[in-house]
Image: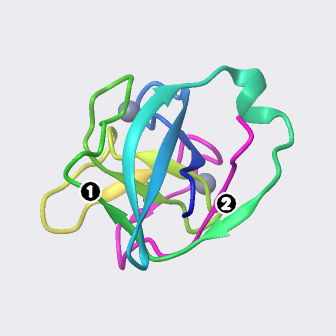
């Protein structure tokens, strides 16, 4: 059995770091629990392991800071952010708290690098 994996994310509104736990469900990885992490945890080197076929489960725990209930992957730096700073209804514009690049949401998240030694 696969044990849960942790992926780092940033609150796009408050620019603070949190972790998202992904649980293996069939051939998908479901985002579930979230928890704040320190800046030290966020910047130190973790062992990385890619996970793919990402889904946001009904149990997704929301951003621990602004309570946004979704996240996106920045196309520039590949960092995960909550969607707390999303603007617009049909085309959603978001800005990455990691590298400050902005863009419109498109497609779905597929592959992530995860960390299992936090
Ligand atoms: Zn947030
Ligand atoms: Zn970015």
Q: Residue 101 occupies which quadrant of the picture?
A: bottom right
Query: Which residue occupies the extreme left position in the image?
Result: 89
**Residue drawn at (27%, 29%), measured in percent from left and top?**
67
Query: Which residue occupies the extreme right position in the image?
Result: 45
What element does badge 1 sit on?
A: loop
What element does badge 2 sit on?
A: loop
Q: Is residue 51 above or below residue 9?
A: below
In the rendered image, the quadrant that contains the C terminus is: top right
Q: Is residue 115 above or below residue 90?
A: above
User: Which range of residues does the magenta coloring cover?
Assistant: 96-118
CA gap between label 2 and label 1 equals 24 Å
Dot 2 or dot 1: first in sequence order is 1
Prevailing secondary structure of the magenta residues: loop
Location of mark 2 (residue): 77
What label does residue 57 carry, if any?
Answer: 1
**Residue drawn at (77%, 57%), measured in percent from left and top?**
48
Is 91 magenta? The answer is no
List x then y, in percent, for residue 65.
Answer: 38, 22
List x then y, in percent, for residue 53.
Answer: 45, 77
């Amino acid at each position: 059995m696969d044990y849960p994996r942790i992926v780092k994310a940033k609150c796009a509104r408050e620019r603070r770091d949190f972790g998202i736990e992904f649980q293996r469900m069939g051939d998908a990885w479901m985002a579930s629990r979230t928890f704040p992490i320190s800046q030290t945890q966020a910047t130190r080197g973790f062992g990385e392991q890619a996970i793919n076929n990402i889904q946001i489960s009904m149990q997704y725990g929301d951003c621990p800071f602004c309570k946004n209930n979704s996240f996106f992957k920045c196309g520039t730096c590949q960092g995960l952010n909550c969607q707390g700073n999303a603007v617009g209804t049909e085309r959603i514009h978001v800005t990455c708290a990691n590298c400050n690049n902005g863009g419109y949401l498109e497609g779905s998240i597929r592959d992530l690098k995860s960390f299992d030694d936090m």
